[in-house]
Structures are given as C-alpha cells and as structure tokens.
Image (tube, rainbow, N blue to C red):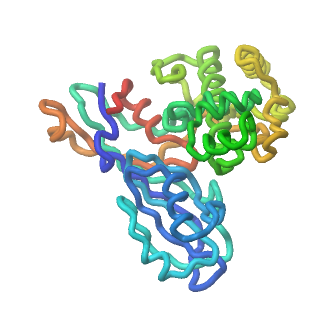
Amino acid sequence: MYTLKQIPEDFIVKERSYVKIADKGKYLYFSLRKKNWNTLDVIQKLAAIFGVSERKIGFAGSKDKNAVTEQICSVEGLCKERLQGVKLQDVVLEFLGYGDLPISLGDLLENYFEIMIRNLVDEKVEIVSFIENYFDEQRMSTNNVAIGRALVKKDFATAVTLIDEAMVSKHLEEKKNDFVGALKKIPIRLLRLYVNAYQSYLWNETLAAYLLSKGEVLKEVNYSLGKFVFVSDSKRFVDLEVPIIGFGSEEVLVDSIMKKITDDLMAKEGINYNDFVIKQIPELTLEGEFRRAFVSVKNMEIGTFEEDDLNVGKKKVLVTFSLGKGSYATMVIKRMVGKINHP
C-alpha cells in the first residue's frame, strides 16, 4: 500500500499551453496557481470578485483540489490592476498578457506532473510509457455519477436532493417542486460536469469489460465504483478507441464486442442513447464521441528513494512525467505500483 496527496505539495500539476500571449487584445490572460481549491470553486469566487459572469472566465481544464496546480485562464475586459489587487487564500494570480481568443476547455498541449509517492515499503516503482486511459476517482467525486445518472434519467428531484446547494434549496422554498428551475440556478459548467462524470463511469465500465474479454490481464485495482483492469499486452490496443456513450453514439459502433458490452451496460443502467437528450435543460444534451483507450506517458523520471518524513520507517520517491490533456496522472501511479491509499 502506498499514499498519494498526503499534503498538497506532494502533487504538483503545471499546465503547458499553446495560447499565444500578446501585448494587447480583447482578453486578459493570467496564471492561476492554487491549492486546496478545485477549479470551478475558485473560478466562481474570482467571478464574484471581478464582477463578471463565471462564463466570462475561461480555462482549459479542471485541476485537483488536494494539489498544487498551475493553469492559464482568460477573462474578457478586465484590467491588469484589478487582477493584481486580488487577495485570496492559497491562490496566486499572475498577469501574463492579452489575446483575441478566450481560453476554452481543451486548449492545452499537456500537463506536467511532479508526484511524491509515500508510505512505500518494498513496492517496485518502474517506468511506464503507455497506460490505460481510465477516468479516475477525482472525476467521480462523492455523488457526481449519481447526480449525472439522475439528470440523464430526468429524475430531477433526486438530482436536486443529491446536489444539496443553498441556491437550489432557496428556489424550492419559493417554488415547491420546480426542480428544473432549481437546477437552472446552478452554473451550467457544474451541471455538465455531473453528466460528464456519469459518461466517464460508463466509459470505464466499457473499457474494463473489453480488456477482460480481449486482453491478458496483469492486475485489477478496485475503486469506489468498480475496478480498473490493466493488461500486459497493452501494445495490442494502441489504436483502440472506446465510445463515450451519448446521443447518437450508437451510429458509430462497429466493433461487435464493444457494441454488446455497451448494450448490456445500458440495459443494466436502464438507459438508452436518446436519454442523453435533455430537453428540459438543452445545454446538458451531450453527443457521443470516442476516447483513446491507451495513451503515452512522456519523459518519465523516477528519483532516489528517501526516508519518508511523514511516515516513520517508510520510503518516498518523486516521479515526474507529462501526460496529454484529459488523462489522469493517478492512473499512471496505479499502473506503476498497484494499490493506493488516499488520506
């Protein structure tokens, strides 16, 4: 058993962006360095401080709360002086420049990671260059999948109960049983995150079932909603793409094994492809797409094993590497070492 993220400084993420910085433009670009905040919460706070809509602040990807993270954001019409006057605990903003385009989800080259693996005894930590591209726990959170499932099934009352937001409760006090209206009080980015989390869970289940059927299983690692299946013959699947289930994705399924797996999974869940059309909140309607089943790990380096200052009698080691956007560094560690202990 080993430990990740015992302290935020054990997990450092630096976004590598291709955004071009200029001396002038419609949008101000700034670096956001944070710890003990998830991205959506700090964006919500900054929007209130700047006096703008949350939608006016652009970012390329959500970053972990229990970590030290750096990413580039954009905001329309903000002056440099207003940015530099912000004081927020565990948040550092740095003015970068301007540009004519907002930053949107996916606008990055890759993420660079510095990860301290703690609480080691005799586990082997070996370099890996290719990993299964599962979505990890931080995507799911405590109730994200259950909320997403409820939204897809149009069970808006359950979704509202699970979200437990003050703005939602206030709306229902004034308009009892107006669950759709209550949900619309929540930022659309957050609502989409719930549906995305449900899609991610379905994707994980699909890939795990496919690898159990077609691969040479190396190990299985349990997580809160199922298990990750790792295979020893990963190079066989270098071109494999797995569908993210959504509206219309049945039209692109040609692999008969994959189709049976997704059909069985949706039957178990009690859903169909058209359920991902959410007419009551059209912004939540999500089409299906493909995601690579395996991705490359670039420039991995493993440091020297040292005495773990936080766990007496144990060892620690620093691992650094880069991953493409949308992939999870914690999955690299699971592939490298095995079982994990989150404090």
Which quarter of the rendered picture does the N terminus lie within?
top left
Judge by depth and name the residue closer to the eye, 125 or 10.
10
46 to 177, vertically: above or below: below
Q: Residue pushed farthest left?
A: 313
User: Residue 197, position in %: x, y?
Assistant: 62, 35
Q: Residue furthest front?
A: 174
Residue farthest to the right, as pictured: 251
Residue 227 in the figure: left or right of residue 279:
left
Residue 129 shows in the view: yes
For the point 72% across and 41% down, which residue is it?
175
The answer to whether residue 219 is left or right of residue 280 is: left
Q: x and y percent of residue 292 in the render?
A: 64, 38
The quarter of the rendered structure image containing the C terminus is: top left
Q: Which residue corresponds to the image point at 43% horizontal and 77% vertical from the top-left?
A: 84
Residue located at (18% from left, 39% from top): 310
Query: For residue 262, what is the image quadrant?
Result: top right
Identify whether 303 is placed above or below 26: above
User: Percent x, y for residue 130?
Assistant: 51, 37
User: Is residue 237 in view?
Assistant: no
Image mark count: 0
Q: Nearer the viewer, residue 124 or 42?
A: 42
In the image, is residue 232 above or below residue 49? above
Percent of width and height locating residue 173 = 65, 40
Q: Nearer the viewer, residue 37 or 288?
A: 37
Q: Which residue is located at x 46 percent, y 18 percent?
A: 219
